[in-house]
Image: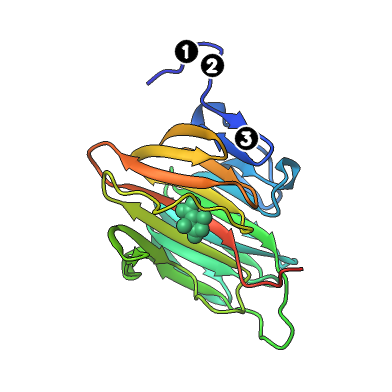
Amino acid sequence: MSIPYGQTRTRVAARHALIAPDGHVKSVVPGITGAATIILINPTMGARFAQVLVTFEAGGSAVVPANDVQTAGYFETGGATLTVGGRKQKVTAGAFFYAPAGEAWSITAPKKGTRVTLFQKKFEPLAGVAAPTAIIGNAADVPGQPFLGDPDARLQVLLPDVPAFDLAMNIFTYQPGATLPFVETHVMEHGLLMLAGQGVYRLEDSWYPVAAGDVIWMASYCPQWFVAMGKTPASYLYYKDVNRAAV
Ligand code: UGY
Ligand code: MN
């Protein structure tokens, strides 16, 4: 569907943002070549993390040296060779990975059009708890659990739910008509990518029709609610900061 000249669904507010694909502009990011790289969310917006969409050309690569940033990544489409934590593996759509701070990682030999979402955040160590180690997995192997007892709203928790991790990466899938059970208001931030379907997202006091490809930033304490609409299930990938002290 073409967007009328001079218009967009994108809205950037103080405590939330909806970024529609029609407004994407590429950035050059060190280490990523042969790809369209879109920095969708980052600290300039007020966030404490970054969400980056990388769409690879054939022959592209992401070769990221070790630094104090950890990365959680999700392959939405395509496939590539992924090297993380000394493991080198061919991966396809649905694959995810976690690269701890202090470890280099790379994506090489991508199929043309491979889309990868990266969530990046400086790691906050927890005294007395060993830092997390590298992970490669596939969402197809992670069962979806009913969310607060609702079998029509299922949550796949991709990374281990243990105190060592200061971030989570989950996939939420709703049958048409299913909702978040209440309007959530919480200290955790979210970065979100609509993977499939459509629905309406409430962010603070605004309601937005959203569909696959849309990205949302929810700041700490942004009231949030979702209803899946349309005839097919809606699903989204999202980031959350977790497991650290209140002050
Ligand atoms: O994990 C969450 O906070 C999740 N229920 N939030 C959301 O989907 N907006
Ligand atoms: Mn939430």
Between label 2 and label 3, give the one nearer the viewer. 2
- For label 2, the residue is 7
Left or right of residue 23, residue 136 in this image:
left
Residue type at the position of mark 1: Pro
CA gap, disc 1 and disc 2: 6 Å
- For label 1, the residue is 4
Rendered view: 11 above or below 194: above
- For label 3, the residue is 26
**First along the sequence among labels 2 and 3:** 2
- Of residues 197 and 118, the one nearer the viewer is 197
How would you rate the neighbour count of disc 2 (Cα within 10 Å): few for under 14, some for 14-19, many for 20 or more? few
Could you tell me if residue 81 is visible in this image?
no
SS at badge 2: loop
Left or right of residue 101, residue 199 in this image:
left
How would you rate the neighbour count of disc 1 (Cα within 10 Å): few for under 14, some for 14-19, many for 20 or more? few
SS at badge 1: loop
